[in-house]
């Protein structure tokens, strides 16, 4: 057998790459990992983690307002963006250190450099120009923010990368996109006091979510003061004489803002990675093509996470990495399970969801029962806030199996995690019905909706 410098070389130090490298090094194998930017990848450095910290920061403005109904007088409040960013940076640096420490403790060799494939067993470490060899290789280089080709003034726009480190908080921002990042950042900036506009090309934000989440969230965001323009895109961005931005939309509207942020999806990070030299095939979007075991077209090379452009979520990349470890190092070929992935949008109110939307379910099943509750959460009875919570279960009328669960309201993400277990376990509506409520909570609605709100027969709603 040929001898290599390493048993396993991982390109990309994000969630997927770090997990695989750590596990395999922990098995006593000779492992190296290379990361060109910072260990932790998108999720830890400029994605989920700093985003959630910014979400927490943005909640305080409403909490100060809500406190009055409970008898509190909150003094004059002021927000300081540099303090938030400094504290966020300190936390991110701490997590990055933990990632590296975990790798080091497991015995993996850490390269702080870009690495590119030279052939299917060789990798060039760019900062030393050294070529090393490995028996097996994992490509886990993630994705990067998409840009609009040909948009005049696109170089004046930021993406989520820069949004985390702006030197100052803009007075007004325009955010393009209707997906997770656009919606979450619109709520963050609004909550921090920024005049916020969202512009989305489609008819309603959050295309793949249940309509009972999309429309009410849209309305709630508008009620807070976020301006939402649907059916439009940015057509031009120009720097104005007062050093702000003049933005023109496809509908001919003119907006004056301090920042324009593009949140229009993410694309795989595969350019100039040497994939062709290693026999690794990509699709037309540049995503690495993998089989059911995350194996690429090159037998000893695997790929996980956003670079495969299947499900762009951190826990999925980690799960896929663990499957690769089983397949490649434990002689246990393992296929990632992508069914019933719960997800949350950290908007205000939040969305938590798992399983099929009503529309998706209606396309697949002839008889649906839909259970839907809309109510003002108890907390808002005294706060005076009018915001509603919505809980919805989509049930297959034939066997009473719960196909989808959707929540719009406080802590919806936390609830989606628990609901995911029930759907994964194949629970039926009868299981929900015989579960005792926890009182007084909002989530007790999930087990006390005894009668369907309506049915859907062969795609048609029946009251
Ligand atoms: P999404 O895929 O969620 O949304 C992209 C949005 O951009 C869509 O609304 C899409 O429109 C729109 N769009 C795409 N191309 C264009 C274009 N050329 N011009 C105008 N609009 C365009 O991507 P995000 O960037 O928001 O996030 C990337 C991924 O990161 C997500 O898919 C998600 O998996 C992950 N993520 C998860 C989070 C979470 O779990 N809470 C948070 C943030 C990100 P259309 O709908 O019409 O296609």
Image (cartoon, rainbow, N blue to C red):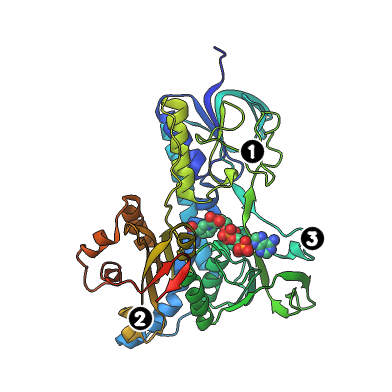
Query: What distance separates the C-alpha of mark 2 from that of mark 3?
Result: 45 Å
Give the x, y percent position of residue 162.
63, 60
Q: Secondary structure at mark 2?
A: loop
Dividing the image into 4 quarters, which one contains the C terminus? bottom left
Q: Quadrant of the N terminus?
A: top right
In terms of sequence position, does the residue under pointer 1 or pointer 2 come before the other? 1
- SS label for mark 1: loop
Instruction: Find numbered disc 3 in the image and state the secondary structure of the residue it sits on.
Output: loop
Crowdedness near tag 2: few (<14), some (14–19) or many (≥20) residues, C-alpha within 10 Å: some
Q: Of the two numbered discs 3 and 1 on the same chain, state the one appearing first in sequence.
A: 1
Numbered badge on residue 150: 3
Which residue is disc 1 drawn over? 114
Give the alpha-carbon distance from disc 1 to disc 2, as whole Å.
51 Å
Residue 165 appears in the rendering: no
Instruction: Report which residue position mark 2 lands on.
Output: 376
Question: Compared with residue 220, is residue 450 higher up or lower down, i.e. above or below?
Answer: above
Confirm or deny contact between disc 2 and disc 3 (CB under 8 A).
no
The nearer-to-camera label among 3 and 1 is: 3
Quarter holding residue 350: bottom left
């Amino acid at each position: 057998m040929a001898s290599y410098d390493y048993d396993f070389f991982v390109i990309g130090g994000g969630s997927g790459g770090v997990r695989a490298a750590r596990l395999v090094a922990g098995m006593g194998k000779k492992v190296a990992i290379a990361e060109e930017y910072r260990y932790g990848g998108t999720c830890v450095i400029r994605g989920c983690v700093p985003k959630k910290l910014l979400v927490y920061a943005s909640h305080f403005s409403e909490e100060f307002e809500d406190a009055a109904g409970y008898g509190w007088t909150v003094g004059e409040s002021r927000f300081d963006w540099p303090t938030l960013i400094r504290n966020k940076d300190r936390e991110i640096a701490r997590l990055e250190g933990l990632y590296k420490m975990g790798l080091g403790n497991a015995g993996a060799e850490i390269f702080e450099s870009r690495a590119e494939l030279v052939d299917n067993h060789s990798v060039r470490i760019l900062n030393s120009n050294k070529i090393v060899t490995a028996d097996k290789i994992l490509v886990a280089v993630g994705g990067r923010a998409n840009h609009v080709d040909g948009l005049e003034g696109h170089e004046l726009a930021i993406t989520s990368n820069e949004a985390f480190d702006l030197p100052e908080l803009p007075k007004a921002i325009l955010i393009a996109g209707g997906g997770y990042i656009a919606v979450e950042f619109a709520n963050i900036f609004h909550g921090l006091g920024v005049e916020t506009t969202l512009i989305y090309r489609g008819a309603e934000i959050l295309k793949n979510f249940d309509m009972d989440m999309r429309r009410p969230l849209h309305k709630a965001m508008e009620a807070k003061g976020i301006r939402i323009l649907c059916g439009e895109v940015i057509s031009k961005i120009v720097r104005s004489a007062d050093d702000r931005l003049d933005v023109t939309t496809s509908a001919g509207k003119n907006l004056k803002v301090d920042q324009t942020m593009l949140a229009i999806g993410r694309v795989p990070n595969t350019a100039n990675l040497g994939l062709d030299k290693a026999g690794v095939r990509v699709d037309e979007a540049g995503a690495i093509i993998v089989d059911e075991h995350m194996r690429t077209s090159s037998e000893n090379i695997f790929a996980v996470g956003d670079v495969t452009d299947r499900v762009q979520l951190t826990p999925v990349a980690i799960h896929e990495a663990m499957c690769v470890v089983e397949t490649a190092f434990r002689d246990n070929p393992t296929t990632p399970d992508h069914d019933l992935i719960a997800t949350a949008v950290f908007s205000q109110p939040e969305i938590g969801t798992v399983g099929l939307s009503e529309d998706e379910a209606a396309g697949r099943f002839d008889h649906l029962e839909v259970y839907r509750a809309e109510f003002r959460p108890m907390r808002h009875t005294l706060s005076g806030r009018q915001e509603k919570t919505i809980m919805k279960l989509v049930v297959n009328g034939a066997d009473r199996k719960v196909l989808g669960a959707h929540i719009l309201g406080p802590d919806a993400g936390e609830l989606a995690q628990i609901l995911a277990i029930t759907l994964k376990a194949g629970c039926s509506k009868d299981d929900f019905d015989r579960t005792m409520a926890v009182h007084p909570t909002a989530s007790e609605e999930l087990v006390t909706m005894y009668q369907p709100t309506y049915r859907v027969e062969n795609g048609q709603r029946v009251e």
